[in-house]
């Protein structure tokens, strides 16, 4: 008889994505996914992720709620270079594909900027 006893599943962090019209989507996102993957898998409008998450398209831009900026951390050089191309970038702008969802981000709120909805 097998004595395998699975470990209890870790609760999934809850992430709130807020669209430019104020629509909020409070979702549970699996640990280890990126914020972008969590958005795409749940059909969040405005997160197109055209490059698939390799930091090359800028179509996954979000703004981190200011109170969460420190927990999320800062962009690395390649991401920062991509964000510099965005005239509307703010100090809290990030590429969702470069942020890994972890338990530390449980409760995170991100906003999808207006610029993500333009053709
Ligand atoms: Fe292309 Fe994030 S998905 S930069």
Image: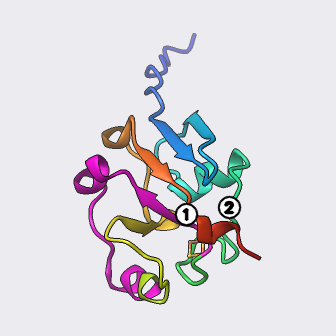
Q: What stretch is highlighted in magenta?
A: 59-82
Q: Label 2: few (<14), some or many (≥20) within 10 Å?
A: many
Q: Earlier in the sequence, mark 1 or mark 2?
A: 2
Q: In which quarter of the image is ligand 1?
A: bottom right
Q: Nearer the viewer, residue 90 or 61?
A: 90
Q: In which quarter of the image is residue 23?
A: top right
Label 1 secondary element:
loop
Label 1, label 2: how far apart the Cα atoms are: 8 Å
Q: Residue 94 carries which label?
A: none
Q: Quadrant of the N terminus?
A: top right
Label 2 secondary element:
loop
* Colour theme: rainbow
Q: Mark 1 points at which residue?
A: 113
Q: Residue 15's x, y, as percent?
A: 48, 40
Q: Quadrant of residue 51?
A: bottom right
63 in relation to 16, above or below? below
Q: Residue at x 55, y 63 (%)?
A: 113
In the orientation shown, which residue stands out farthest toward the left? 70
40 in relation to 9, above or below? below
Q: Residue at x 33, y 85 (%)?
A: 77
Q: Nearer the viewer, mark 1 or mark 2?
A: 1
Horizontally, residue 109 falls left or right of residue 30, namely left
Quick check: marks 1 and 2 in contact, CB under 8 Å? yes
Q: Quadrant of the C terminus?
A: bottom right
Residue 3 is one of the magenta-drawn residues: no
Q: Residue at x 38, y 36 (%)?
A: 106
Q: Which of 4 and 63 is in front in this view?
A: 63
Q: Mark 2 points at which residue?
A: 46
Q: Residue 50's x, y, as percent?
A: 70, 75
């Amino acid at each position: 008889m097998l004595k395998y006893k699975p470990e209890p599943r870790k609760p999934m962090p809850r992430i709130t994505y807020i669209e430019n019209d104020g629509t909020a989507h409070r979702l549970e996102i699996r640990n280890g996914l990126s914020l972008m993957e969590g958005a795409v898998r749940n059909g969040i409008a405005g997160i197109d992720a055209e490059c698939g998450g390799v930091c090359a398209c800028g179509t996954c831009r979000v703004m981190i709620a200011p109170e969460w900026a420190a927990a999320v951390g800062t962009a690395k050089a390649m991401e920062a270079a991509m964000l510099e191309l965005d005239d509307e970038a703010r100090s809290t702008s990030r590429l969702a594909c470069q942020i890994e969802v972890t338990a530390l981000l449980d409760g995170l709120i991100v906003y999808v900027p207006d610029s993500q909805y333009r053709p």
